[in-house]
Amino acid sequence: MELNTKYKNQIIEDEIEEHNLDKYDFSNATFIGVNAKGKSFRYCNLFNLTIDINKNKQTDFSGANLSFVLNFDTVKNINKAVFNDNTILDDIDFENLTKRDPITAHKLKQIRYIGRFKSENKRLYKIWKISCDCGRSWKKLLKWAILSVFCFGLFFYFCEKSSLCFLPHISFIKDPNTLFPLSFFQSMQFSALSFVGFNMPEVTWNRSWTGFWVIAETWLGLAFLGMLVTVISTRLVKND
């Protein structure tokens, strides 16, 4: 395969003129703060390419197509480059990079998996991205979980005052013959326990639709549990 040698052994700063860089030879070249966003590097030779930083500006491969590049595992300082979920990394061998820099290799493998998942399941990807940044942010997931519990708690609390039959009416059992509406705190407690799959034995409801809303919150909690597992597994592998 014949490669374009225009950039071979060259020092490249800030911008590359061409958008389509397929089959270019970048062997022994140096990227200094290069903006490579959205550019195509398919079948390029990256042998001994060096990534450097210029005035805190990183080489950016966001949205770039790096499929089938050659000698990717010989790139120096690859951890200084920027990649995102739109970077295409198909058919790249990370074996040697995994031995040399396992954290960066794991990050790039994760980006490759997320990219494939996004192309096959766009709607699920959006939910995964918004809820926990595709398994990379437990803080984001925790915020959504707290918000969900709070919203369901408010829903249960205020619906008690409504006469609509399809809204949940939940009561606190003070004694076998006396029922009281849930207080604000009890509504939040009931919502939190329902979210993690538990129930309060001293709470009952007198509307058939109430069970639907409680089950809906429980299923939502299970979905969050599944995403929590992905977050934990991602962090464990990253720190391995």
Image: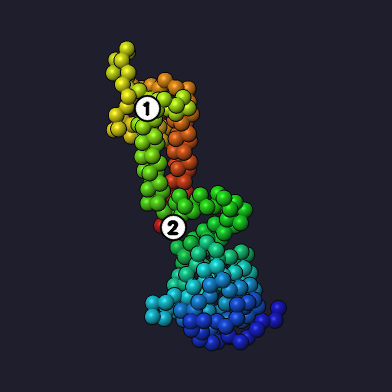
Q: Which residue is farthest right?
A: 1
Taking the spot 52% from the left edge, 58% from the top edge, the residue there is: 110
Label 1 amino acid? Glu
Residue 239: numbered disc: none
User: 108 and 132: which one is in front?
Assistant: 132
- Residue 150 in the image: state x and y as whole percent: 36, 39
Q: Is residue 31 visible?
A: no
Taking the spot 41% from the left edge, 57% from the top edge, the residue there is: 239
- Colour scheme in use: rainbow
As drawn, 11 above or below 148: below
**Disc 2 designates what residue?**
238
Q: Is residue 39 visible?
A: yes
User: 126 and 136: which one is in front?
Assistant: 126
**Disc 1 designates what residue?**
160
- Residue 180 in the image: state x and y as whole percent: 31, 21
In 3D space, how far apart are the residues under numbered discs 2 and 1 (Cα atoms)? Answer: 47 Å
User: 183 and 27: which one is in front?
Assistant: 183
Q: Which residue is farthest front?
A: 163
- Answer left or right for 53 relative to 49: left
Taking the spot 56% from the left edge, 71% from the top edge, the residue there is: 38
- Answer left or right for 199 relative to 220: left
- Answer left or right for 219 relative to 143: right
